[in-house]
Image: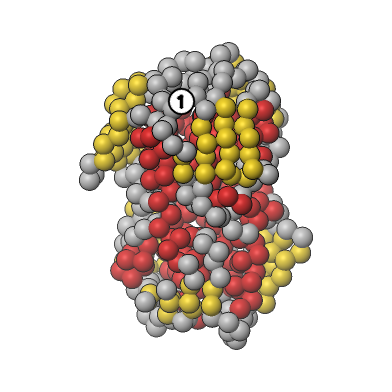
Amino acid sequence: MISHKIDHGINGCPIIPGDKSISHRAIIIPSISNGVTEITNILKSEDVNNTLEAFKEMGVKIIDNEDKLIIYGNGLKSLKKPKKEIYLGNSGTSARLLTGLLAAQNFDTKITGDKSLSKRPMNRIADPLSAMKAEIFTSNGSLPIEIKGKQLESSNIEISIPSAQIKSALLFAFLNTNGKSTITESKVTRDHTEIMLKAFGADIDIDSKGRKKLITINGLKELKAKNIDVPCDLSSSAFFIVAALINKNSKITLKNININPTRNGLLLALEKMGARINYLNRRISNDENVCDMEISSSNLKGCELDNSFADLMIDEYPILSVAAAFADSPSIFRGLKELRVKESDRLNLIYLNLLNCGVDCNIIEDDLIINPSKKFEIKNNNIRTDYDHRIAMSFCVMGTKIGPLKINDAESINTSFPSFINEFKSVGGKII
Ligand code: S3P
C-alpha cells in the first residue's frame, strides 16, 4: 500500500469503529453472564472476531445481526471445553484475558496465535495467576500455552507491570474463584473491565490506599446480562486527529468517541502541543465518558512527556511521534519500555521509520527524542511494520505530508480497523 502526499486538507466526518478494548470485554462478560445481551457498534475486526470465535467454540450461542450482536449467556460455569485449540491470531488482549478466564474452568485448553503474537510475553500473566495455584504451561514464556483448568485459590496479588490485560485476566480468574480476591495496582491502567463487571452486577469493590488502587472481587456470584452500546475508539480516532492537525486547511468532526480518563493521554499530550481540538457533548454512555470532537489544522510545538503518560496512552506513541515530527520544536517521550512488547517492538520501528523518513530522532534507554526539521530528506520510503497495525496507520498519516511512502504488510490494519483505508480516502487521504 502506498500513501501519497496530499495538497489539500483532511476534511469531513470519518466514521470511527467501536472501541477494541471494550468490544473484547463486550463478548467475554456477556458470554459468562445470565441472560441475553444485545451489543451495538461492536468493532468488527480480526482481533475481536478471534475472541468471538473462541466463545462460540466454547458453546456460547452468539448471533451476528447486521446492526447488533446478540449473546445468550448461561452463567459463570457454562463454558464447554472447545473441540480444538483456541487460535487467537494477532490479538494479545484476547490471549491475556482468556488465559485468566480459562485457568479457572473445569476443562483444559490450548491457546495459539500468529507469528507476532507467539513472540509476545505470556509469563506476565502466567506468573501472577500461579499465585492462585493456576497451572499454565507456556512455550518459553510465550504461546502456544496449555492451561489446565481447575478450582483456583483466592489471593491478594500486587501487579508489578502496569497492564490492563494482566489486571483483567486476574479479574476474570477471580470471578470463578470462591471467596474474596484482591488486585493492587500502583499505576493507572484502563478500567473498562471494572466498569463493565460492575454494570453486570459483579460483587466488585474498588478502593484506594495512598496512590494504589485495590480491586476486590467476591467470586462465584452470577452476573446479569445488560445491553451494551460500544463507544467509538479513541486509539483509532488518533490517526485522523493527527492527520487533521498536521495538514493545512483541515477540519474534521468525530462522533461518540470514548475519552475514558484512564487512557486519554494522547489528548493531554496534544493539548500541551497546542492542538486545536474542541470537545462537544461530553456525556456518559454505558458508564464510559464519551464526547464528539472538532479538530482543525494546528501549529504544533514539541513537548516533554514523563513516564506517567505511558500509562495513559501506550498505544498512541506511534501516531504521536508522527505529530512530533511536524512540530516546531523537539519532543521527548520518556519511559517507553512497554512499547517494545506490543504487536512489534514499536519503539524501534518508530525510530527506524522516522529516520528513513529523514527525521532526526534518537532512543536513549527507554526515551524517544524527536528533533523536527523543516526539510525531510527521505532515505528509504519503504516503511517496515512487522505486521503492526498501529505502525502501518501512523505512517499512512506521515505519507500525507512527505509521501509516497510504501507501507509494507498493511493487511495488519484489519486487526483493528478494517474500514481505515476507505475512511481515510473519504477525508482526503490518498492511498493506492
Ligand atoms: C489493552 C491494554 C493495553 C493496550 C492494548 C489493549 C486492553 O495493553 O496496549 O492494546 O484491552 O486491555 P497493556 O494493558 O498490556 O499495556
Circle 1 Cα neighbour tier, 10 Å, few/some/many (<14 / 14–19 / ≥20): some
Residue at horizontal 39 percent and vertical 83 percent from the top = 7
Residue at horizontal 28 percent and vertical 38 percent from the top = 69
Screen quadrant of the N terminus: bottom left
* Nearer the observer, 113 or 422: 113
Q: Farthest residue toward the left?
A: 66
Residue at horizontal 71 percent and vertical 37 percent from the top = 160
**Rendering coords of residue 184 (x, y %):** 66, 29
**Residue kind at label 1, given as amino acid type:** Lys
Horizontal relation, residue 345 to residue 263: left or right: right
Residue 319 shows in the view: no
Residue highlighted by disc 1: 198
**Rendering coords of residue 202 (x, y %):** 46, 21
Q: Work out whether 222 lies above or below 37.
A: above
Q: Quadrant of residue 50?
A: top left
Q: Any atom of ligand 1 within 8 Å of the CB at mark 1?
A: no
Screen quadrant of the C terminus: bottom left
Please count the marks in the image: 1
Q: Work out whether 169 lies above or below 204.
A: below
Horizontal relation, residue 187 to residue 249: left or right: right
Q: Secondary structure at mark 1?
A: helix
**Rendering coords of residue 423 (x, y %):** 33, 64
* Nearer the observer, 416 or 226: 416
Q: Farthest residue toward the front?
A: 83
* Nearer the observer, 71 or 396: 71
Residue at horizontal 54 percent and vertical 66 percent from the top = 385
* Nearer the observer, 162 or 346: 346
